[in-house]
Amino acid sequence: MKSRYEAAKNVFVDSIDIDDYIELESSASAYKQLAHSIDKPLKMILLFGRPGTGKSILLNRIAQNLKYQKEIHYFDTPATNTKEFFHKLFKVLTKKDLPQNTEVNFSALVNYCKKLRGKREIIILLDEAQMYGPEMMEKIRLISDSRAVKFVVSLHKTENEDLIAKEHFQSRIWEVIELKNASLSDLTQYIHKKLLKKNLFEIANSIHEKDMKLIYTFTKGNYRECNKLLFTIFEICEYYDKNEPSKVNYEQITQKIIEIAGLKLGFIHV
Ligand SMILES: Nc1ncnc2c1ncn2[C@@H]1O[C@H](COP(=O)(O)OP(=O)(O)O)[C@@H](O)[C@H]1O
Ligand SMILES: [Mg+2]
């Protein structure tokens, strides 16, 4: 028999499916800021935050919402070679495919963009931009100087490296939007709403305030860490439900299960 926890577990598989987007206080405010910045005459906008703070889902959401009003394109994980990137950009700008074995002539592309100025405004959302090297960023900057192409550059903020301090990411034209980890109230809403969207009412109700606090302590409000933790919690519940149902408390996820999951994922140590 299928355990009801199996469905709950699958709710927390990490994905950036915009149908699963949840309006939270912090995401709504970041969305507004980004939408507002995109309307301003800026060449580049910087979106940054730690991994797992919701940058990719936000970019996907804005691309989806604005696709009928603007020429907006989401570029996911960058290709390791610049050739592939420029092929993609070429296609977006000219609406034509370039033969596989030809290289994009960069200065011709810049001139092409200059001619588009005032006629078209193309918005490119560059995810994982920490993977673009200085040369690429310089080329991207030159294209943005045409003012026909605007870039939203999404960067991972890491503990030990301040990427924005790097020369090639510095410029006066940037507007910066920072995504942070969720607050306890946003994280609570995130977990509840995700479960409710899949009609898992009882399970949503079985996670009480005290449990949310423990989940928050472990994950510090990081959405990706939260997904991992909840997936593991429900995986454990599923195991007991199938094998030792007498041990399952359906009214409440016990703190003990959260702790076992936390231990398994290394959030706590023995
Ligand atoms: N507002 C939100 N609504 C729904 N899911 C979200 C939201 N914010 C973050 N997530 C989820 O959290 C996880 C991490 O988000 P992601 O956009 O991949 O972060 P980043 O790109 O900053 O590393 C993903 O599974 C994503 O679906
Ligand atoms: Mg991402």
Image (tube, helix red, strand yellow):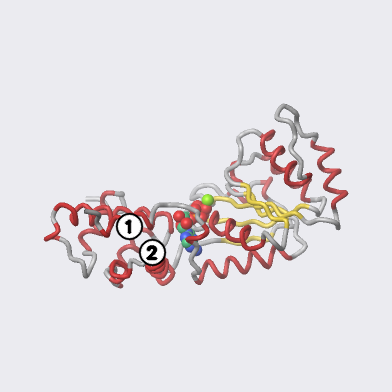
In x, y percent, where is residue 141?
75, 47
Using the rendered view, name the quadrant where residue 233 is placed.
bottom left
Give the residue drawn at x 50%, y 54%.
16
The answer to whether residue 69 shows anywhere in this view is: yes
38 and 99: which is toward the camera: 99
Q: Earlier in the sequence, mark 1 or mark 2?
A: 1
Q: Please say if the residues under marks 1 and 2 sit with CB atoms less than 8 Å apart.
A: yes
Question: At 32% from the left edge and 55% from the top edge, which residue is drawn?
Answer: 9
Residue 40, how many percent across, how many down?
74, 65
Residue 50 shows in this picture:
no
Q: Callout 2: helix, strand or loop? A: loop
Tally the numbered discs.
2
Q: CA distance from mark 1 to mark 2?
A: 8 Å
The relative height of residue 201 versus residue 123 in the rendered view (above or below) is below
For disc 1, the marked residue is 7
Residue sitting farthest toward the front:
1
